[in-house]
Image (cartoon, helix red, strand yellow):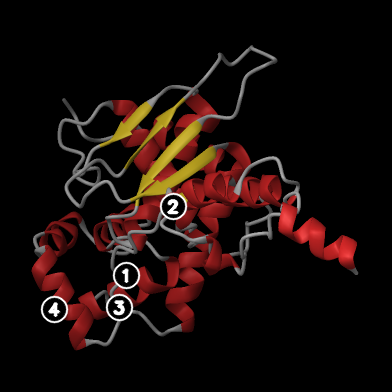
């Protein structure tokens, strides 16, 4: 199986990415972690620590493309992986939501395209085009004086665009700033060595945050409690799903009022 997309396929993906950047009013803006907000416009999203070796995420599509009652797709993002990988996973899933309407599971080796299906390679290329626009990439390289492509320069660009090292290396090849040989040389670096370079050059290591966020569950639960639709105990249960307590949100248990006891009634009558 060839791992190269055809020129026509690449041009189509570029067109799709440019169109979506325009729709999202992000044509002149680095996306970065804004991708999570964009994803929430088109899907119900759960962020959950699935494990560092687990899939990066998955998408469940409900209904069909022509179903007027179609609900938002459901997307899960694995927060046991570094933040830059979460960003890439979110952009990858948007491709499947926007253009394929098909369920998808992102394997832990997502960035290794060897023997990957063509739709996965298309989604990866779309994510790269959407997150690292060619014009913006060249502008940032000029701004920061990155002329010769070194690991330090690549990591600086990774920090600016919030994408994985290997994604940025491939992107630099795609815009012809490095050769195939240089790309292969840079891709030979291990995750351990990349981490060491980050420390050497004082770049932020975007560790997994292990956060748990279940769409707008917290907001709905709090609103339901404030309107007395659910008990305090039910609120505690719902918040615990996201490892939160009512106290974390400044909520204290409402005072429960009952009928006065016989002794209390006697005291009232005596007064």
Quadrant where the C terminus is found in the figure? bottom right
Which residue lies under the disc numbered 1? Answer: 206
Mark in front: 1 vs 4: 1
Question: Dot 2 lies on which element?
Answer: helix
What residue did someone put label 3 on?
153
The mark that comes first in sequence, 2 or 1, is 1
The location of residue 37, given as percent across then percent down, is 58, 53
Which residue: 64% across, 42% down? Answer: 230
What residue would you read off at disc 4? 196
Q: Is residue 115 left or right of residue 33?
A: left
Mark 4 and mark 3: Cα distance apart in space: 15 Å
2 vs 1, front mark: 2
Question: In the picture, residue 201 is in which quadrant?
Answer: bottom left
Depth order, front residue of 125/109: 109
Please state if 242 lies on the left or on the right of 34 as rendered: left
Marks 3, 2: nearer the viewer:
2
Residue at the (34%, 64%) spot, across then down: 209
Q: Is residue 35 above or below residue 159?
A: above
CA gap, disc 2 to disc 4?
Answer: 37 Å
Q: Secondary structure at mark 3?
A: helix
State the separation of the CA atoms marked 3 and 2.
42 Å
Task: Check disc 4 and report its element: helix, strand or loop.
Answer: helix
Cβ atoms at labels 3 and 2 below 8 Å apart: no
- Mark linked to residue 240: 2
Task: Between residue 250 and residue 109, name the one nearer to us.
Answer: 250
Q: Which mark is residue 159?
A: none
């Amino acid at each position: 199986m060839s791992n190269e997309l055809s020129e026509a396929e690449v041009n189509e993906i570029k067109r799709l990415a440019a169109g979506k950047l325009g729709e999202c009013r992000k044509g002149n803006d680095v996306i970065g972690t804004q991708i999570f907000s964009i994803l929430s416009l088109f899907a119900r999203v759960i962020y959950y620590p699935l494990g560092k070796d687990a899939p990066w995420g998955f998408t469940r599509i409900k209904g069909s493309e022509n179903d007027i009652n179609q609900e938002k797709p459901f997307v899960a993002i694995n927060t046991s992986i570094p933040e830059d990988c979460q960003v890439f996973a979110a952009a990858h899933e948007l491709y499947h939501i926007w253009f394929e309407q098909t369920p998808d599971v992102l394997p832990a080796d997502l960035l290794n395209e060897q023997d990957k299906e063509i739709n996965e390679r298309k989604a990866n290329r779309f994510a790269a085009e959407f997150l690292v626009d060619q014009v913006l990439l060249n502008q940032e390289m000029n701004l920061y004086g990155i002329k010769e492509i070194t690991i330090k320069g690549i990591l600086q660009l990774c920090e600016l665009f919030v994408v994985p090292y290997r994604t940025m290396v491939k992107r630099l090849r795609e815009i012809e700033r490095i050769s195939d040989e240089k790309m292969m040389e840079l891709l030979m670096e291990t995750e351990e060595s990349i981490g060491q370079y980050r420390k050497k050059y004082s770049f932020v290591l975007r560790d997994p945050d292990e956060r748990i966020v279940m769409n707008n569950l917290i907001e709905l639960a709090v609103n339901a409690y404030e309107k007395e639709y659910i008990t305090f105990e039910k609120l505690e249960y719902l918040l615990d799903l996201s490892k939160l307590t009512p106290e974390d949100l400044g909520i204290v248990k409402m005072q429960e009022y009952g009928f006065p006891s016989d002794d209390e009634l006697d005291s009232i009558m005596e007064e």
